[in-house]
Amino acid sequence: MDSNNVMKDTGGVIVARVLMTIFLTVFIGLMCMTISVRSSIFSVKSWREFFTSEETLDVFMESADIDEITEDPILEGRIDKDFFRDYARLMLDEVFDAVETGDTEVDEDALDDIYDEYLEDLIRENAPRSDRDRLKYEFFDVAQESVDDVYDGLEETGFCDYMHRINAQSNVFIAVLAFFSIGLIVAMLIISKEKFAALRNTGIALAVSEAFNSLIVGGLGALIQAAINSADASDSDEEIMELLASFFGKLTTRALTILIVGFVVGIVFIVSGEILRRHVRKVNAAE
């Protein structure tokens, strides 16, 4: 009996472990919520995917009356409609690259590919040889100026600075929360004679925080989608509003996926920690 009792924690240790678990639940919850939100709505990659998707580009092409442009007597049958789509996608990619890195230099190789595929033959057929190089360089200059103008506009609104600041602050926030969370887990291991009880309590903190976070994220996502769907929009804006509602649905799913994975890991920790804790007790009792 004495050897069995040696491996059991005192009441004071159990109370301390419960308090640590409560704080751990808060820290892990805030950390995982920050990671999930940053990976979804505050992710430049997410917005890049939305604006460069086929569905969004279709709406943009319709609003820009591309059919009317390509049916102009001068251009009819001479320029592919896909030019406008590929050019718009490249420009959007370059703008998002600039937002992420601060470098507005356009990828000349990609621009050259578009020129060779869609414009080279058109210019060769309609411009004298002496003007062809000039027209090509003007095409490159217009593309570069377009990216510069959009990026400058975003900088003036503070958008770029805001995104960079969000990323930097979230990195610090996540690092601090991870430091305190690891500290609490180590402290539970140090004070506990039943080491696997610390694993179980870590799982409890993870599962509870992720379940709570999932309710918050799911609820907010549903509210945002409902607000977008109920907003008054003209016929020309209705399609883009539908795309936005679908986009926020995808962002919510992405955030929930991260949280649900954390919840499952927490359940695994709870079950394995409890099984191992009881196994150790039986071994000690047998000894």
Image (spheres, grey):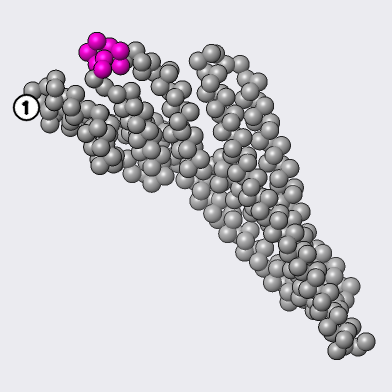
Q: Going by the image, does 272 lie left or right of 125?
A: right
Compared with 239, 210 (above or below) is below
Question: Label 1 sits on what residue type?
Answer: Ser
| Residue 237 seen in this snapshot | yes
Q: Going by the image, does 14 lie left or right of 104?
A: right
Instruction: Say which residue appears at 77% left-offset and 69% top-offset.
Output: 273
Q: Is residue 221 magenta?
A: no
Magenta residues? 70-77
Residue 99: x %, y % from top left: 41, 41
Q: Nearer the viewer, residue 274 or 102?
A: 274
Q: Residue furthest right?
A: 1
Image-quadrant location for residue 148: top left
Q: Is residue 73 magenta?
A: yes
Dominant secondary structure (helix, strand or loop) of the stretch shown in magenta: loop
Compared with 140, 123 (above or below) is above
Q: Which residue is mark 1?
A: 130
